[in-house]
Image: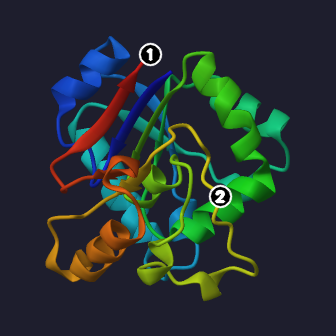
Amino acid sequence: MKLHLASFRIPSAEILESLIGVTLEGLNIAVIANAKDQRTYRAEDVRLTHRFLGGLGISAQEVDLRDLANSTGVTEALSTFGMVYVMGGNGFVLREAMRASQFDEAIHGLVEAGLVYASESAGSVVAGRTLCGTETVDDTSKVDEPIFEGLGLIDKIIVPHASRRMYAGYLEHMRSTFESEELIILNDNEAYVVND
């Protein structure tokens, strides 16, 4: 299992290349932007992310989970890629899309088969065991029924954006709610990497 769980973007191309075992130049990846589904600037965020990835030499193609209806569809849609990049946004909106498409069922088999799960912000948070506490920064009213269960790719809780002042209250809430060994606290220039 190979995971690259970042706070923001890809802080080190070299570390990601070391994880995946190939250079980023010409790498073909899937981008999941469903955490942005309820935002008016979704298209602009996707465009900026594709431009950033393109600057690293990566060829990115969006896979919209709203177009997929079951785990077989997710597996087929992602099986031609070596890496999936899950963007940030609202973690509850993202989890709703993952549940509806059965991405949350398919992803375990995909990463065990070699797909690299790379992410930023909410995309990293949902990889952990729970979204509890993120309701202080992500609006749960954007979904019918919030899903607090994470994907469980790691048995920890990712806390991104620790270096941003606007997230100071969130960071303090997480530190007071959970034991320190449960948390992986990341500044925007950091990523938590798993290479099994």
Quarter assignment of residue 4: top left
Q: Where is residue 86 in the image (x, y as percent from the top left)?
A: 48, 48
161 left or right, relative to 94: left
**From the viewer's perspective, is residue 180 above or below residue 45?**
above
Q: Residue at x 61, y 70 (%)?
A: 93
Tag 2's secondary structure? loop
Please indicate, yes or no, whether residue 193 appears anywhere in the rendered image. Answer: yes
The image quadrant where one finds the C terminus is top left
Q: Position of residue 125 (x, y in %)?
A: 45, 55
Residue found at the far bottom of this picture? 141
Query: Which amino acid, by three-letter code, is at mark 2?
Result: Glu
Tag 1's secondary structure? loop
Q: Any mark on residue 196, and which? A: 1
**From the viewer's perspective, is residue 140 above or below residue 134?**
below
Q: Any mark on residue 149, and which? A: 2
Please tell me which residue lies in front, 55 or 19: 19
Q: Any mark on residue 114, and which? A: none
